[in-house]
Image (spheres, grey):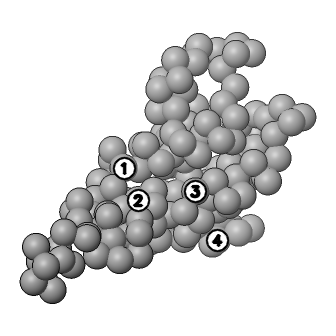
Amino acid sequence: MQEGMFADIVGRIREKDPHFDADAYFFVREALDFTSRMLKKPVQGEHRHVTGQELLEGIRAYAVQEYGPMARTVLDSWGIARTEDFGTIVFHLVEAGILGKTERDQRDDFVDGYNFYDAFVKPFLPTTSRKKAATGRACPRKAARRSGQA
């Protein structure tokens, strides 16, 4: 589909529901292509279908690749704050006839896919901060050094 036609359809979607920035729709479409390549799906045909869970993982990987530590900030600026938002965008595109779906596909496939902090912030924290985030406390060696026990 040509960019201009896609942009027109996104414009019509946003007239009904302006919550998400137009760039969010372009990103999801690009992330779907990225996911298909990542999963080595055929370009056409029945076996090209990508499930909601596969797409969420592809979206995560694509956002991290494209935006690095700014991924969460970029998504927030587009109105995307949780995985359910990706499902809303996908189903807006399905309803507009841009994407297809099977009878098994549903919005609930995108509910609680992952935590945005874990997916888009944590991978870029320094190692000690990641340990602290995982355990809820500081790195044991550093805590021991601060207390004079090391």
Residue 47: give x, y in percent of width and height: 70, 16
Query: Please, what is the three-letter code of the amino acid marked with disc 3?
Result: Tyr
Q: Are marks 1 and 4 in contact (CB under 8 Å)?
A: no
Query: Please, what is the three-letter code of the amino acid marked with disc 1?
Result: Val
Q: Nearer the viewer, mark 4 or mark 3?
A: 3
Tag shown at residue 114: 3
Looking at marks 3 and 1 on the same chain, the residue that comes earlier in the sequence is marked by 1
Q: Are marks 2 and 1 in contact (CB under 8 Å)?
A: yes
* Residue in view at x 42 percent, y 43 percent: 62
Residue occupied by mark 4: 18
Q: CA distance from mark 2 to mark 1?
A: 7 Å
Looking at marks 4 and 3 on the same chain, the residue that comes earlier in the sequence is marked by 4
Secondary structure of the residue carrying numbered label 1: helix
Q: CA distance from mark 3 to mark 1?
A: 14 Å
Looking at marks 2 and 1 on the same chain, the residue that comes earlier in the sequence is marked by 1
Residue 56 vertical position relative to residue 100 in the rendered view, above or below: below
Residue 77: give x, y in percent of width and height: 44, 71
Residue 91: give x, y in percent of width and height: 75, 50
- Is 97 placed left or right of 65 in the picture? right
Category of crowding for the residue at label 4, using alpha-carbon neighbours closer than 10 angstroms: few (below 14), some (14–19), many (at least 20) = few
The image quarter containing residue 1 is top right
Q: Nearer the viewer, mark 1 or mark 4?
A: 1
Residue occupied by mark 2: 120
Q: CA distance from mark 4 to mark 3?
A: 24 Å
Q: Are marks 4 and 2 in contact (CB under 8 Å)?
A: no
Residue occupied by mark 1: 64
User: Is any part of residue 139 visible from this angle?
Assistant: yes
- Is 104 placed left or right of 113 in the picture? right
Looking at marks 4 and 2 on the same chain, the residue that comes earlier in the sequence is marked by 4
Secondary structure of the residue carrying numbered label 3: loop
- Is 117 placed left or right of 88 in the picture? left
